[in-house]
Image (spheres, rainbow, N blue to C red):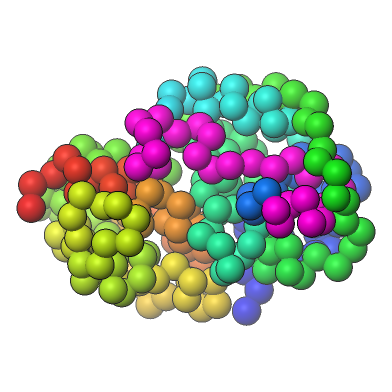
């Protein structure tokens, strides 16, 4: 089932490259150097985060914008993001969420990832030409852990989706979490399934997605957006909740 915006197929991706889009590659360095879309710049999802290695929390909008501008992102150029798809952690969705939250008007993800790209590839790393990216943060796309805690405890909580694997939802600790478990009231809905089918969810209730550090939930945000839902991502996710909220 082809996904809608922000996802694009190969012909559309080729057209974006030809018109001068900024291309970002979210894969590991070894995969990137083995062959990437011509002109693609490698990007690390942790780059604009703050709070140390066990944090997915974005910094201030101006700082995040400066980080991506240095990689070549510009308000006046479309962005194409390519990654490992389901062989990765959904990093391309996280980068797309970052940039859409910043207010960039034309962010696209290569559906299927680099495995579907059969056109020419380059091996030498690209040198980014800095762009101009003005931050105009969209608060509707992001919810902090503190705001989520208040929402969960309210009389009208959001529909909260835990997009990690079921064993993580049940308590498995795989990524140095402070403790296992899930946010009270959350529903388990692993992210990879969202890339193949629209979920049976109400469309009149606010949706919040989270994972461990806001990466898989970034891809869940992209997929649910493509399916027509309105979604906010909790970038702190379980790392922050387990560390700051009571059992």
Compared with residue 203, is residue 41 higher up or lower down, i.e. above or below?
Answer: above
Q: Residue at (76%, 70%) from the top-left corner?
A: 116
Tell whether position 231 is magenta: no
Q: Residue at (81%, 32%) from the top-left corner?
A: 127
Compared with residue 48, is residue 223 higher up or lower down, i.e. above or below?
Answer: below
Q: Residue at (56%, 62%) from the top-left corner?
A: 88
Tell whether position 55 is magenta: yes
Q: How many marks?
A: 0
User: Is 43 situated left or right of 37 in this image?
Assistant: left
Point out the residue furthest to the front here.
Answer: 30
Main SS, magenta residues: loop
> Picture coordinates of residue 50 (x, y %)?
40, 30
Write down the quadrant of residue 59 in the picture: top left
Write down the quadrant of residue 169 in the picture: bottom left
User: Is 216 situated left or right of 146 in this image?
Assistant: right
Q: Residue at (7%, 53%) from the top-left corner?
A: 247
> Picture coordinates of residue 93 (x, y %)?
55, 54
Q: Which residues are magenta?
A: 30-56
> Picture coordinates of residue 17 (x, y %)?
85, 48
């Amino acid at each position: 089932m082809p996904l809608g915006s922000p996802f694009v197929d190969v012909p559309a991706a080729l057209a974006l490259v030809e018109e001068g889009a900024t291309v970002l590659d979210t894969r590991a360095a070894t995969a990137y150097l083995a062959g990437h879309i011509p002109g693609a710049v490698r990007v690390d999802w942790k780059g604009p985060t703050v709070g140390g290695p066990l944090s997915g929390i974005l910094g201030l909008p101006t700082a995040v914008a400066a980080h991506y501008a240095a990689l070549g992102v510009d308000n006046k150029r479309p962005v194409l993001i390519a990654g490992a798809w389901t062989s990765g952690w959904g990093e391309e969705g996280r980068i797309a969420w970052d940039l859409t939250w910043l207010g960039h008007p034309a962010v696209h993800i290569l559906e299927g990832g680099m495995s579907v790209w059969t056109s020419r590839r380059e091996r030498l790393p690209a040198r980014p030409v800095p762009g101009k990216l003005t931050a105009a943060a969209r608060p509707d796309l992001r919810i902090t852990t503190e705001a989520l805690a208040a929402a969960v405890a309210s009389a009208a909580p959001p529909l909260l989706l835990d997009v990690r694997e079921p064993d993580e939802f049940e308590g498995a600790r795989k990524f140095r979490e402070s403790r296992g478990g899930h946010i009270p009231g959350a529903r388990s809905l692993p992210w990879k399934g969202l890339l193949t089918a629209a979920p049976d969810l109400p469309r009149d209730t606010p949706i919040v997605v989270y994972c461990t550090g806001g990466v898989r939930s970034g891809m869940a945000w992209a997929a649910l957006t493509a399916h027509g839902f309105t979604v906010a991502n909790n970038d702190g996710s379980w790392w922050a909740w387990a560390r700051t909220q009571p059992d």
